[in-house]
Amino acid sequence: MDRLTAVLCSRNPHKARELERLLPGWTIEPLERGDYPPETGATYYENARIKAEFGRGNTSGWVLAEDSGLEVEALGGRPGVLSARYAPEGAPAVEKLLGELAHVEDRRARYVSELVLRAPDGSELRGTGTLEGRIADEAAGSEGFGYDPIFVPDGEEQTVAELGNDWKERSSHRARAAHALLAALSASTPEETPRVR
Ligand code: IMP
């Protein structure tokens, strides 16, 4: 089976690396553009579609788009679809969130990932994945990105940044979304596309 190539509509290099590992048989090429449209959707799916639509204007091949975020129970689901804009990526966002949750007992949170794949003929497939967990009291670990140093998945004692990239490849919200997408893809065109591993 020949490898297929999808252009990934994302400015986040971490996502391209994670998705390439998660989608066997696919080469993921990040679309490096400085003029991505604003993510004005009310849902992850709407935002993923905005990115996919932008990608379709830049290539005639397969287009992959992803929108994801962190929903914190005690904050009514914030930052949610606004996760990337909650604060600059990395330590400031982590510190801001820990500050907002200081003295808050309910630490429950979930990651959500929504993937949209557009075929060259314009048809669309999607895959959704969630990961339940809680926000740690302090940051720990060095792998992953974004909120990973303070997110402890249910059933684990360490943060995602401590559990590492191999754990993310098996169990993250993005891994679950990728598996759902690959299953949808196999069901739609089993003979033409790489199969779910
Ligand atoms: P997007 O590029 O608009 O989808 O931004 C998603 C934002 O959600 C990222 O910038 C991170 O802040 C957060 N996020 C999504 N997935 C992850 C993850 O796997 N680890 C840590 N943070 C994540």
Image (cartoon, rainbow, N blue to C red):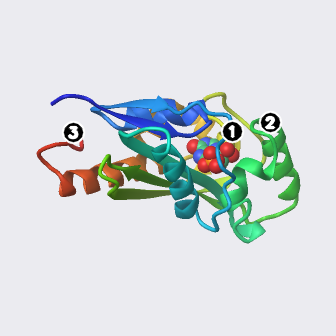
Between residues 144 and 59, which one lies in front from this camera angle?
A: 59
| Residue situated furthest bottom in the rendering | 76
Q: Which residue is painted at 75% across and 38% down in the image?
A: 89
Indicate which disc residue 149 carries.
1
Q: Earlier in the sequence, mark 2 or mark 3?
A: 2
- Residue 157 shows up from this direction: no
Q: Nearer the viewer, residue 13 or 151?
A: 13
Q: Position of residue 162 (x, y in %)?
A: 60, 33
Real-space CA distance between mark 1 and mark 3, rounded to the nearest whole angstrom: 33 Å
The answer to which of 111 and 6 lies nearer the viewer is: 6
**On screen, residue 180 above or below 22:** below
Amino acid type at circle 3 is Pro
Asked if 5 appears above or below 36 in the picture, the reply is: above
- Classify mark 1: residues with Cα within 10 Å, few (<14), some (14-19) or many (20+): many
Which label number is shown at residue 194?
3
**The quarter of the displayed image where residue 46 is located:** bottom right
- Between 5 and 152, the one lying in front of the other is 5
Instruction: Give the mark nearer the N terminus: 1 vs 2.
Output: 2
Cβ at disc 2 under 8 Å from ligand 1: no
Q: Which residue is mark 2?
A: 91
Which numbered dot is residue 82? none
The answer to whether 15 appears left or right of 102 in the picture is: left
Which amino acid does the dot numbered 1 rest on? Pro
What SS does tag 2 mark?
A: helix
Q: Residue at x 35, y 38 (%)?
A: 23
* Crowd band around label 3 with a 10 angstrom C-alpha radius: few (<14), some (14–19), many (20+): some
Q: Quadrant of residue 42?
A: bottom right
The response on whether ligand 1 sits within 8 Å of label 1 is: no
The residue under the point 32% across, 57% down is 123
**Mark 2 crowdedness (10 Å alpha carbons): few <14, some 14-19, many ≥20:** some
Query: Gap in Å between the C-alphas at discs 1 and 2?
Result: 9 Å
Q: Quadrant of the C terminus?
A: top left
